[in-house]
Amino acid sequence: MDLISSLETALGQLAGFLWGPPLVALLVGGGLFFLIYSRFVPYRHLGESLRLLFAPSDGNDPGQLSHFQALCTALSGTLGMGNVSGVALAIAMGGPGAIFWMWVSALLGIATKFYTCTLAVMYRGQDSEGVWQGGPMYVIREGLGKRWVPLAYFFALAGLFGTLPIFQVNQLVQILRDTIAIPSGVTSAESHFSFDLIAGCVIAVIVLIVGLGKLPRLGRVSRVLVPSMVAGYILLTGFVIISHLSEVPAALALIVNDAFTGNAVAGGAVGTVIIMGIRRAAFSNEAGIGTEAMAHGAARTKVPVKEGLVAMLGPIIDTLIVCTCTALVILISGVWQTGDADGATLTATAFGELFPMGGEVILALLVSALSLSTVFTFWYYGSKCLGFFIGARYQHHYIWFYIVLVVIGAVSSLQVVVNLIDSMYALMAIPTMTSALLLAPKVNQAVQAYFKPK
């Protein structure tokens, strides 16, 4: 136990150091720069984004996924525990005001995703097997040149650890244990290691089946799983919110007020509220982190701006809609002020309070599907990072290492898992944002050509 406590402390200090004002300034300031530098192109062309999302792609275009599949694959990597457990952690650690700063981050993240994902297609590179790939490591190598290649390897290394499945699996097992296994007597709150281990092994088998099918199977699974589960989650949260509609204005007022006072955190630390909101938003929608660019970089298109326009829908769906629904349920229920529950358990408890007729179980089933889709997608991201390091011909071996990590994640400490992933996300953001800022003029040139009157 001493070792685990020491590890929790060390990783907590590392995450706190990395997620300091400089990184927050890079993500928020970078997003603001992209928004102004583009003359608000992402906001002015949301209609075009929706049109492109459902437009048929040319089979002769380079890439492996349609626009819709690419967005669903990217969303499958962000929708899940970031929207359920991540929101709960933001409120528990930063107070309700953290949600406001998640909104701010998402609004700026729309522009950030437009730039990073446009660049992911614009600067696709060939891996060692001659297959065209996208992602920050290829953007850096192809767009910035050889002297920047160490930064590309830096991203790939951080991405290899940042896309580990341990957080998603940890919280998935926790919500299944707390909402189904313990109430039904399958396991107990005091002794649940055996249940966690077995659940981890079952999840590992499911991941292996999808992983052996590679990206095409992942795209097909995401295309079906993500829209249906998001719709189900919004229906569940929507029913709860509408049932308590009179309490929504007070919850929204609490979010806005606490964002500038920090009353809900120790000492009224507004800085803590802001950093926690930005930190959890990055985990939720990944704008500026770079992982989503790997999915959008596989889109079937010759026009990079098209994929950038589709990609920018991600923060709207992920943070502004889904995360807000989760936050309102937690705040209206009041459970965030009572008890010691955290993460997915806090969200499940909130649904249990407001939707007593099986709300926790329905939530567990919906979140299970969303979390599994994230685990599938993180396998793809991690294998691409490994392939960049050791060669694409060997990257398929990553699946065996990955399923072991799935089992480890099921039985790990939540704080160790959260702090490790937060630290890696911070490190991934540095090369992603740096390359996007340096190559922003190239995106603007492509935008002018795309929207030029025909």
Image (tube, rainbow, N blue to C red):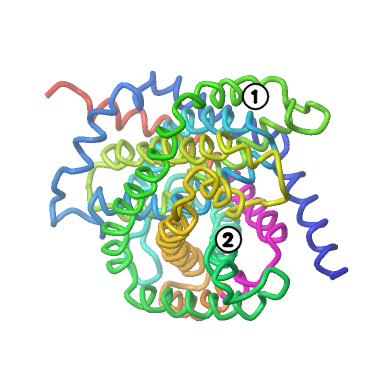
Task: Magenta stretch: give its range.
Answer: 407-430
Q: Position of residue 140 (x, y in %)?
A: 48, 49
As shown in the figure, which amino acid type bears the numbered disc 2?
Gln
Query: Is residue 36 positioned above or below 165 on the image?
Result: above
Residue closer to the observer: 375 or 366: 366
Tell whether position 38 is magenta: no
Instruction: Please state if 171 lies on the left or on the right of 368 as rendered.
Output: right
As shown in the figure, which amino acid type bears the numbered disc 1?
Ala
Ranked by sequence position, the earlier of labels 2 and 1 is 2
Q: Position of residue 49 (x, y in %)?
A: 26, 34
Can residue 141 be seen by looking at this rendering?
no
- What residue appears at the point 39 percent right and 51 percent down from the top-left corner? 74
Q: Position of residue 77 (x, y in %)?
A: 44, 55
- What residue appears at the point 42 percent right and 72 percent down from the top-left corner? 392
Q: Secondary structure at mark 1?
A: helix
Residue closer to the observer: 325 or 411: 325
Q: Name the main secondary structure of what is drawn in magenta.
A: helix
- What residue appears at the point 57 percent right and 20 percent down from the top-left corner? 253
Q: Position of residue 211 (x, y in %)?
A: 39, 74
Residue closer to the observer: 127 or 266: 266
Q: CA distance from mark 2 to mark 1?
A: 27 Å
Mark 2 highlights which residue?
A: 171
Q: Secondary structure at mark 2?
A: helix
Dividing the picture into quadrants, the one containing residue 173 is: bottom right
Dividing the picture into quadrants, the one containing residue 269 is: top right
